[in-house]
Structure formats: structure tokens, C-alpha cells
Amino acid sequence: MGASKGGTAVLKAATVLEPRPDAVVSLSGPTQYGSTDALAAAPGLTSPVLYMAGADDNPFGDAAVQLSRASTKAPENRLYELKGVYQHGVALLDDAKNWSTVLAFLKKHCT
């Protein structure tokens, strides 16, 4: 799990780590940060993935949509684009419902 630039990093890392992670969570991850291109990596993601971003946190809400659409090989691909929300990264987890969503996803997939 990573937030903001960490969200970009975990997506890229999940495509090259061995063994592959049980699940990946990206909170407000941009499509690219520096030389790390999560959008290019997303089609190779084969772990379940959860994307969460505030729809009003530009450009990160749009990035979550793009990354989710590109994650075509992920066995589960969850997108939570939170309408009317501008919080970024770990601040999304201040909301108990969002935190519960992340925990449930991780409990479902992580051994």
C-alpha cells in the first residue's frame, strides 16, 4: 500500500517483485512520478488492486480512473473515486468508511 508518490511506487513494484504481492492499494497515486511510470506498468499488474482517490483532488482522481482502466490483468480491480472529496493520500483514511474499505480488501486478499 502506498499514498501519493508511494501509490505510484507500489504499482510499479508490484509488477516486478517476486513473489508477486497478495494485493496492492494505491491512495491518490499519480500516473507518473519522476521516472516511475505507473500507467505503463498497470497493464502488467497481476495482483488484486484497489485504487482510492478524491474526485476533487486533481489530477489524482483522474489518475485513479486511468490506472484502473489500464489494470486489465488484475484479478480484482476496485476503483473508489470519492465524489466531493478533495483529501489526498493518507488523509483519505481519516474517514472510517474508507479505512474499513481498505482493511476489508486487504483481509480478503492477504494471507
Image: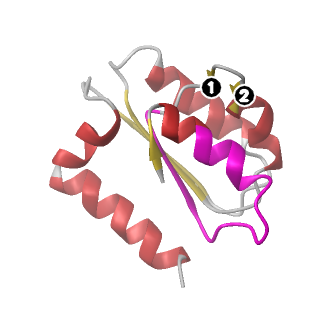
Compared to residue 6, the image places residue 40 above or below, namely above
Q: Residue furthest top?
A: 58
**In the picture, which quadrant includes the C terminus?**
bottom right
Count of numbered marks: 2
Q: Which residues are magenta?
A: 9-28
Q: Cα distance, mark 1 to mark 2?
A: 6 Å
- Confirm whether the magenta stretch covers residue 15: yes
The residue depicted at 71 percent of the width and 63 percent of the height is: 75
Mark sitting on residue 89: none
Compared to residue 90, the image places residue 84 above or below, namely above
Residues at marks 1 and 2 touching, judged by CB atoms closer than 8 Å: yes
Q: Which residue is mark 1?
A: 31
Mark sitting on residue 37: 2
Compared to residue 71, the image places residue 8 above or below, namely above
Instruction: Give the amino acid at mark 2.
Output: Asp
Instruction: Give the amino acid at mark 1.
Output: Thr
Classify 10 Å Cα crowding around label 1: few (below 14), some (14-19), many (20 and above).
many
